[in-house]
């Protein structure tokens, strides 16, 4: 049975009711506002996920660097490069993976000064340090080194190729 109301509120049989154009536009506007809030939250969550990936990639490089140290005659020299020592891989792939997570790039600075958007890995015989920028705006860089330090800094801590600490 089809019913509707007239201007006085009386119900009449046989008439269809529906939404006015204004009512539909209001609903669409509300949906638009809610979706923009959700999308903004998703972008923030995505950046935090990328930061977690960067930190994970650099943190896992510590164990690999120790394996390299043992296989390389108790020396970290070359741990940032691409050449394996006695079959043990370097940490280069982990630092490159951190850079890829940040901006998709595959180029890193090896034994040089770091920068705000550069992934950097420095090594001497006695130690090593690697840092990469974080995706979240204003988060800075994440750094790990051979002394066990993990730090988030506002600027690069690797000022030269001889700098192998995160402080």
Image (tube, rainbow, N blue to C red):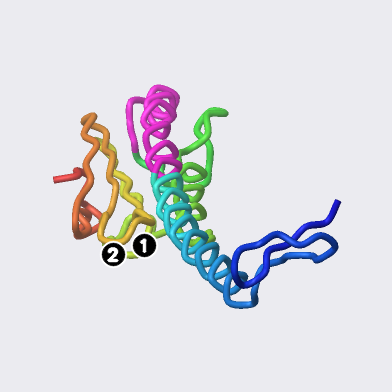
C-beta proximity under 8 Å, tags 1 and 2: yes
- According to the image, label 1 marks what residue? 118
Q: Nearer the viewer, residue 40 or 62?
A: 40
Q: Is residue 146 above or below residue 83?
A: above
Query: Where's residue 54, x and y in %?
Result: 42, 45
Query: Where's residue 25, x and y in %?
Result: 58, 74
Q: Indicate yes or no whether the magenta region holds residue 152.
A: no
Q: Is residue 50 above or below residue 146?
A: below
Horizontally, residue 69 falls left or right of residue 30, namely: left
Q: Is residue 63 above or below residue 154?
A: above
Quadrant for residue 15, please give it. bottom right
The 10 Å Cα crowd at callout 1, few under 14, some 14 to 19, many 20 or more, is: some
- According to the image, label 2 marks what residue? 115
Horizontally, residue 144 falls left or right of residue 101, namely: left
What is the secondary structure assignment of the residue under circle 2?
loop
Q: Nearer the viewer, residue 85 or 92?
A: 92
Horizontally, residue 151 falls left or right of residue 35, namely: left
The span picked out in magenta is 52-76
Q: Which mark is residue 35?
A: none
Q: Indicate yes or no whether the magenta region holds residue 68.
A: yes
CA–CA distance in space, label 1 to label 2: 5 Å
């Amino acid at each position: 049975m089809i019913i509707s109301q007239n201007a006085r509120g009386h119900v009449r049989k046989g008439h269809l009711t529906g939404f006015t154009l204004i009512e539909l536009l209001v609903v669409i506007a509300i949906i638009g506002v809610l979706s923009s809030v959700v999308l903004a939250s998703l972008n923030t969550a995505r950046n935090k996920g990328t930061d977690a990936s960067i930190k994970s990639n650099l943190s896992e490089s510590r164990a690999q660097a120790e394996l390299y140290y043992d296989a390389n005659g108790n020396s970290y020299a070359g741990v940032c490069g691409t050449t394996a020592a006695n079959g043990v891989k370097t940490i280069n792939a982990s630092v490159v993976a951190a850079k890829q997570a940040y901006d998709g790039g595959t180029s890193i600075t090896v034994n040089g000064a770091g920068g705000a958007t550069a992934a950097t890995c420095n090594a001497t015989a006695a130690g090593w340090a690697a840092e990469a920028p974080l995706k979240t705006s204003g988060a800075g860089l994440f750094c790990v080194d051979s002394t066990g330090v993990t730090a988030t800094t506002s600027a690069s801590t690797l000022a030269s190729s001889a700098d192998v600490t995160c402080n």
